[in-house]
Structure formats: structure tokens, C-alpha cells
Amino acid sequence: MSKALQGLLDLLDLEQIEENIFRGQSQSAVVPRVFGGQVAAQALVAAGRTVSADRLAHSLHAYFLRPGDPGAPIVYTVERMNDGRSFTARRVVAVQHGQPIFALSASFQRHEDGLEHQAPMPSAPDPATLPTSQDRLRGYDHIAPEVVEKFIEAREAIDLRYVEEPPYGKFGAPREPHSQVWFRTNGKLEGPIDDPLLHVVLATYVSDMTLLDSVLLAHGRGGWAVGDVVGASLDHAMWFHRPFRADEWLLYDQESPSASGGRGLGQARIYTQDGQLAISVIQEGVVRVPREH
């Protein structure tokens, strides 16, 4: 296991300070606030630790309320909404400096057999044929070196590979509002830590990294890395359909159906390498063009 991946797992391993109350730390991000995927993943960890192991997360719905302070711990309070025969529901509020910064509702289900169908997996090149994020970023002379280093550090625990040029790699002209990335953890998950909740939590962490890319592509914008837009996540929803492993390749197929009112919508499907639809994701974020003074 890489040092970076172990650091991410440590970040997601919350401290329990009271019944239904947990505390997590933060790490530096590309922008000077807590990375949204981190707080979503930690909140799901907090919820999952109050649920019996035979019930797996099947959905989450979340709102980002305030920018998080990466220099301060985050306290997660879990409300036990329901414990039914098949489903369990939890609500989690993340607090910093006495104010809520994030709210999540999550639902868990005991395994059940039922009807089966899925949307087919789209075509995509083999991830082994694609450059790593680090290889791509090292070639972008138009991005400030300190920004490149922040990107590389923030994604060191995740092997994330774009199928086409990311928004910050090629911008200035609109492209199809569609983006694909392959991702997996930078190391295997083995031993006592290898449980289904961890794989779901890690996918939640990664899901906030690239989902709004397709909004930027539609308008020829490079994004926060080059400073031609400012933005932040507003809300985030995920549905976990089938088992998957975060340490095996997953295809993140993303598109944007709409942008208006200073907001952009991204929607996506995540497939296992053998074609199983594992996760559906929808996110809306603030996407604004900086004002000229």
C-alpha cells in the first residue's frame, strides 16, 4: 500500500468521542477549503459506524453548506432516523467553529434479491493505455507549478486517468459536455480494513473530484486550475447499485445536461471494468465566470 493511500485511510478513520458523535481531521486541498469529497466520505463513515454490518449503503443525499476550514477538526453528529426490517436511515451534520458546514442523509439496506437490469457500459479505452494524472499534469506549462504540485498531492492516493484531455489541459473552445476517467486506489485494500463500507466511502471521496468537468467542457473553460471560473459543490447524490472494489478499475462516465443561473449540473455512471453498473451520481455546483473589474 502506498504511503499516500495509507494517509487517506487514516484521514477517513474517524475518532469516536461520544455515542453518535465522531471527529475527523482535514488535509490540504487544491483550493483553500476542505475538499468536498473528504467531508462527504467522512460523514458516510460516521453514519456507517452506527449501522449493523449486514446493511450496506445504497444511497446518500448531501448538501454543502459552508466552506470547511482545513486547519480545524470536523465534528460529525449522527441522528438515527430509522431502523427498519430492511432499511436503515441516518442523518449526519458536520460542524466546524460552531456552524454546520455539511449535511448528509444516507440509507442502508440488508441484502435482497430482486429484478435486474442496467444501462450498458459505454466504450472506453483500456486504462493501462492512458497517462496517469501526474504524467499529464507535468506536461502542462500553462498551469502554475504550485497548482500542479497541489493537484498531484491531492490525488496521490488515487490513480485517476482521463480518457481525453481534462478541462484545464485543453480549453478556449467548447467541447462535448462529456468526460470519462478511470480510477482506483493507489494500492490494494487487504486485511481487516477490507470491508464493503470502505469501498463505498472511497468511491464517494473520488466522486467529487471530476464530476463538474463536463460543465466546464461545454463552455471551453479550464476551471479552477487556470482561474477562468470560480465554483464550489452545492449538493451531491449517489446510489450504490452493485458490489464493487475501489482498488480495481472503475469507469466514471460523466456528462452535463444543463448550466444556468450560475449553477452547473453533472450526472454520471460508474462501471466496473467488466461492465457492471455500480453507482449513479448527480451533483450541482456553483460555476461562475469571474467578474472583470
Image (spheres, grey):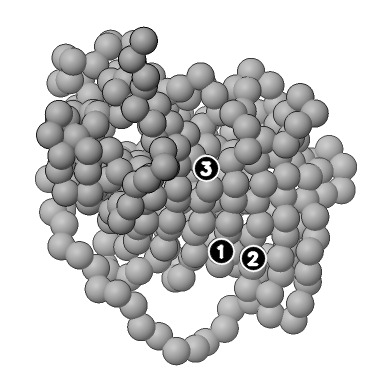
Residue 149 is situated, as x and y percent measured from the top left of the image, at 34, 17
Q: In the rendered view, tell whether residue 105 sits above or below residue 233.
A: below
Amino acid type, callout 2: Ser
Q: CA distance from mark 3 to mark 2?
A: 20 Å
Pointer 2 residue: 107
Quarter in which the C terminus is drawn: top left
Q: Could you say which disc has been placed on residue 59 in the image?
A: 1
Which of the marked residues, 3 or 2, is nearer the chain's N terminus?
2
Residue 121 is situated, as x and y percent measured from the top left of the image, at 24, 68
Q: Residue at x 39, y 50 (%)?
A: 265
Q: Residue at x 15, y 39 (%)?
A: 174
Which of the marked residues, 1 or 3, is nearer the chain's N terminus?
1
Amino acid type, callout 1: Ser
Q: Relative to the observer, which residue lies in front, 278 or 222?
A: 222
Q: Residue at x 56, y 67 (%)?
A: 58
Q: Are marks 1 and 2 in contact (CB under 8 Å)?
A: yes
Which of the marked residues, 1 or 2, is nearer the chain's N terminus?
1
Quarter in which the N terminus is drawn: top left
User: Is any part of residue 260 visible from this angle?
Assistant: yes
Q: In the rendered view, tell whether residue 281 sits above or below residue 205.
A: below
Residue 25 is situated, as x and y percent measured from the top left of the image, at 65, 28
Q: Could you say which disc has been placed on residue 234 in the image?
A: 3
Element assignment for label 3: strand
Along the horizontal axis of the image, is 235 left or right of 53? left
Q: CA distance from mark 1 to mark 2?
A: 5 Å
Q: Residue at x 45, y 48 (%)?
A: 284
Q: CA distance from mark 1 to mark 3?
A: 17 Å
Q: Residues within 10 Å of mark 2 (few under 14, many from 20)?
A: many
Amino acid type, callout 3: Leu
Q: Are marks 3 and 2 in contact (CB under 8 Å)?
A: no
- For marks 1 and 3, give the one nearer the viewer: 3
